[in-house]
Image (cartoon, rainbow, N blue to C red):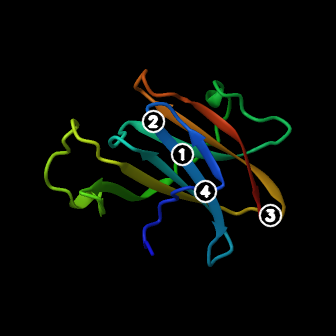
Amino acid sequence: MSTWKKIPNSGEGWELSGESVLNADSFLDKSGATTIRLTHSNVYCPIDGVNLSVRIGDANAPTEWDKAESRDDWISPVLVEELLEIDDVEVERSTVTTPIDMEEETPWDATYEVNFELAKGTHRIEIRVESQDEYFMSGVLSDWEVEV
């Protein structure tokens, strides 16, 4: 059994551009706060330069895909784990001392967390994906409901 925090295939997931996938999960931590965990994965290589942020949305007025700037309460989650798969073994990216050969496939997972104090009930979680790279999509994923 893996001790990694990454979310390999949760019930909530989105296909992003560039062969990337974003998986999400939520759970109550020891203090009673709700932890939102996101894992951005790519089967080919690390995807640097993509930023994620999260907010509690409104089911009656979800943020439109291209209107992230219409909201000012985005919170950046903290990177808690970044893994590379080298020779069929997952290792922390920070321990890799040789440059990544971009000609070879090097699967990558980056896992982020943020905590919210949420009341019991159903909440809409919105995720903003931002990239400066025109090849990679930017927009708001606004269809995830979390039950506390």
Quadrant that contains the C terminus: bottom right
Disc with the residue nearer the chain's start (4 vs 1):
4
**The image quarter in which residue 139 lies:** top right
Instruction: Name the element at disc 2.
Output: loop
Q: Residues within 10 Å of mark 1 (few under 14, many from 20)?
A: many
**Mark 3 or mark 4, which is nearer the start of the sequence?**
4
Residue at point 82%, 56% (across, down): 122
Mark-to-mark CA distance, 4 and 2: 17 Å
The residue carrying pointer 2 sits among few (fewer than 14), some (14 to 19) or many (20 or more) residues within 10 Å by Cα, namely few
Q: Nearer the viewer, mark 4 or mark 1?
A: 4
Number of marks in picture: 4
The kind of residue tagged 1 is Leu
Residue 84 position in % (x across, y down): 31, 54
Q: Amino acid at mark 3?
A: Ala
Q: Which mark is residue 22?
A: 1
In this view, the residue in front, 16 or 28, is 16
The residue beneath circle 3 is 119
Q: Place residue 116 in its image quadrant.
A: bottom right
In the picture as drawn, the residue positioned furthest to the left comes out as: 98
Q: Taking 69 as reference, is 57 left or right?
A: right
Q: Which amino acid is tagged 2?
A: Glu
Measured Cα–Cα span from mark 4 to mark 1: 10 Å
**Mark 4 — residue?**
10
Q: Nearer the viewer, mark 1 or mark 2?
A: 2
Residue 124 at x, y = what percent? 76, 48
Q: Which residue is mark 2?
A: 19
* Res 52 visible: yes
Q: Amino acid at mark 4?
A: Ser
In terms of secondary structure, where does tag 3 sit?
loop
User: Disc 2 or 3, which lies upstream in sequence?
Assistant: 2
For the point 61% across and 56% down, the residue is 10
**In the depicted view, which residue is nearer to us: 114 or 42?**
42
